[in-house]
Amino acid sequence: GINAEYMGDIISLVRLANVHNILAAYNPTSGEALMRILEMGLKDKSIIPSFYETLESPSVAEYKRGQQALILALTQAEQTMRKSKFQGPLAATPEEPEAKEQAVLFVGGKGRGE
């Protein structure tokens, strides 16, 4: 079987192969099939059009959209924080007893007596 120590690496490699649309064969039978398809694809480009037209998987575009959305959300959150009237750890109000502790943790201090 597969050593559990390497399972994370294997999963990452398979994910990268899928994201970047890399032909991959994980056993001798799929390797043989892959070689035959490549041979056929040299004679008839319509068999594996992505090999000739683009090597980027459609999942890459989706991944990039997700990353752009995340960057936008983080940028907006940062701008909101900068615009707020946050005065640091001393801004805690009696109604929010944990606000001071959270603020200290946020700015790199230690909370809860740590």
Image (tube, rainbow, N blue to C red):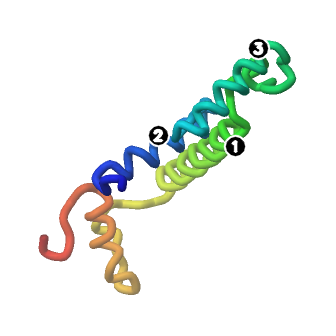
Point 53% across, 49% down: residue: 74
Question: Disc 3 and disc 1: Cα gap in Å?
Answer: 29 Å
Question: Disc 2 and disc 3: Cα gap in Å?
Answer: 27 Å
The residue indicated by pointer 2 is 13
Q: Which element is circle 2 on? A: helix
Q: In which quarter of the image is the C terminus?
A: bottom left
Q: In which quarter of the image is the N terminus?
A: bottom left
As drawn, which residue projects farthest toward the top?
43
Query: Which mark is on residue 44?
Result: none
Which of the 4 image quadrants contains residue 98? bottom left
The residue indicated by pointer 3 is 42
Question: Disc 1 and disc 2: Cα gap in Å?
Answer: 19 Å
Q: Where is residue 60 in the image (x, y as percent from the top left)?
A: 65, 37
The residue indicated by pointer 1 is 62
Identity, as a three-letter code, of the amino acid under mark 3: Leu
Q: Considering only vertical position in the picture, is 31 above or below 88?
A: above
Q: Indicate which disc, 1 or 2, sits on the residue closer to the N terminus.
A: 2
